[in-house]
Image (tube, rainbow, N blue to C red):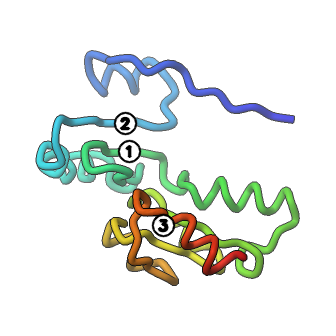
């Protein structure tokens, strides 16, 4: 059996210092507002083009991950270990940009009403309810039960 561990978050002096001194699996960039994150997103996308994926889970945070390291990879690995067919037996629910690939690889991808446009575009179904309005319960009721 394997366990995963994420170290405690810490503020670092610079990204260059971080990359030079440690193995990095994910960078989280947090800002005080959506506008502040939107303002720097293109800079980070250009800096990591071809090396990492820049995505957003929530409006005030960017995630930077190595290419191919997204929720779909973890879901597929888990399903493979359980001998579960993702196209026949799985329904996934999401709202953030970082959920889009996961919704794309399963047979039933459901986006909440408050989902990012990228996530809605790849979903098989888009609900009228948000995650704060019992959207997950609605998805389970409609597509699982």
Discs 3/2, front: 3
Q: Which mark is drawn over residue 28?
A: 2
The residue at which mark 3 appears reads as 135
**In this view, the mark in front (1 or 3):** 3
Which type of secondary structure does the marked residue at label 3 adopt?
helix
25 lies left or right of 87: left
Query: In percent of the image, x 16 and y 42: which residue is there?
Result: 33
Placement of 33 over or under 126, stated as above or below: above
User: Is residue 102 rendered to the left or right of residue 37?
Assistant: right
- Res 98 visible: yes
Whether residue 61 is situated above or below residue 94 in the rendered picture: above
Left or right, 8 with reference to 128: right
Residue beneath the point at 86% across and 59% down: 82
Dot 2 lies on which element? strand
Kindly identify which residue carries mark 1. 63
Image coords of residue 85 (percent x, y):
79, 74
Q: Is residue 80 left or right of residue 55?
A: right
């Amino acid at each position: 059996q394997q366990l995963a561990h994420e170290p405690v978050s810490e503020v670092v002096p610079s990204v260059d210092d971080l990359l030079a001194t440690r193995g990095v699996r994910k960078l989280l960039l947090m800002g005080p507002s959506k506008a502040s994150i939107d303002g720097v997103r293109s800079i980070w996308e250009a800096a990591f083009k071809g090396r990492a994926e820049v995505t957003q889970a929530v409006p005030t945070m960017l995630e930077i991950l190595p290419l191919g390291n997204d929720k779909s990879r973890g879901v597929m690995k888990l399903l493979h270990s359980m001998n579960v067919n993702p196209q026949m037996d799985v329904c996934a629910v999401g709202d953030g940009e970082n959920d889009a690939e996961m919704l794309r690889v399963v047979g039933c991808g459901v986006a909440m009403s408050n989902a990012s446009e990228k996530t809605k575009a790849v979903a098989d179904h888009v609900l009228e309810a948000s995650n704060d309005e019992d959207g997950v319960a609605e998805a389970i009721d409609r597509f699982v039960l």
